[in-house]
Image (spheres, rainbow, N blue to C red):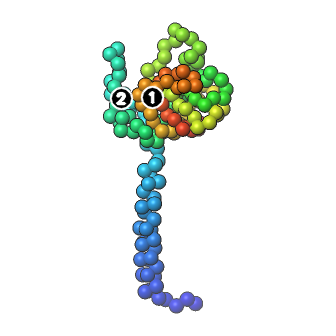
Amino acid sequence: MIPHRPHLLRALSRRGLLTGLAALPVSLPALAAEAETLTFDGLYKSFGVLGFQFSDRATFLRGKPVRMIGYMAPPLKPESHFFVLTREPLAICPFCQSDADWPVDIVVVFMRAATPMVSAGQKVAVSGRLEIGSSTDAETGFVSQIRLVDAGFHSV
């Protein structure tokens, strides 16, 4: 039988508390690195014939990890290092028809590595670092205003 020693229990409790507090500074940066959710409605403050203005939230999240949910537009090829994320599923590849209406609410996603794409109409959750502002991809020539880079995705 173990003898009852309340002073040891108090010491263990204090030790546990101090150990937990000591670990807190290590945990806070890990929490800060988690991706924040960004929605298609949260991308722009205004958008129209005179141009667009990024939302305050998108501007604040520039350079930070974000998570978005949407649909993968039909890809150009079955395995790629980038795709277009859209609010609604598209039936055709937006690159394949010059007169197709390009959706306003799109985000270009650049993957960490070439990845097999999912079938059109499948909802995906994407996480990556948010970049905003006009940019032309050197490899594809694709011009974008909003991008997720170093991204990964999974079906939802």
Q: Quadrant of residue 153?
A: top right
Task: Characterize the local packing of mark 2: few (<14), some (14-19) or many (20 or more) Cα atoms within 10 angstroms.
Answer: some
Residue lying furthest front: 138
Report the amino acid beneath label 1: Ile
Q: Are marks 2 and 1 in contact (CB under 8 Å)?
A: yes
Figure check: 10 above or below 141: below
Position in image of residue 64 (x %, y %): 43, 41
> Which label is found at residue 119?
none
Q: Quadrant of residue 76?
A: top right
Position in image of residue 91 (x %, y %): 58, 18
Can residue 41 be seen in this snapshot?
no
* Residue at numbered disc 2: 54
Q: Residue drawn 32% across and 34% down? A: 56
Quarter holding the C terminus? top right
Q: Is residue 119 left or right of residue 143?
A: right
Task: Give the CA distance from mark 2 to mark 1.
Answer: 9 Å
Quarter holding the N terminus? bottom right
Position in image of residue 135 (x %, y %): 46, 26
Query: Which secondary structure, mark 1?
Result: strand
Labels 2 and 1: the sequence-earlier one: 2
* Residue at numbered disc 1: 146
Query: Which secondary structure, mark 2?
Result: strand
Viewer-proximal residue, 104 or 109? 109
Report the amino acid beneath label 2: Phe
Position in image of residue 97 (x %, y %): 56, 11
Viewer-proximal residue, 122 or 135? 135
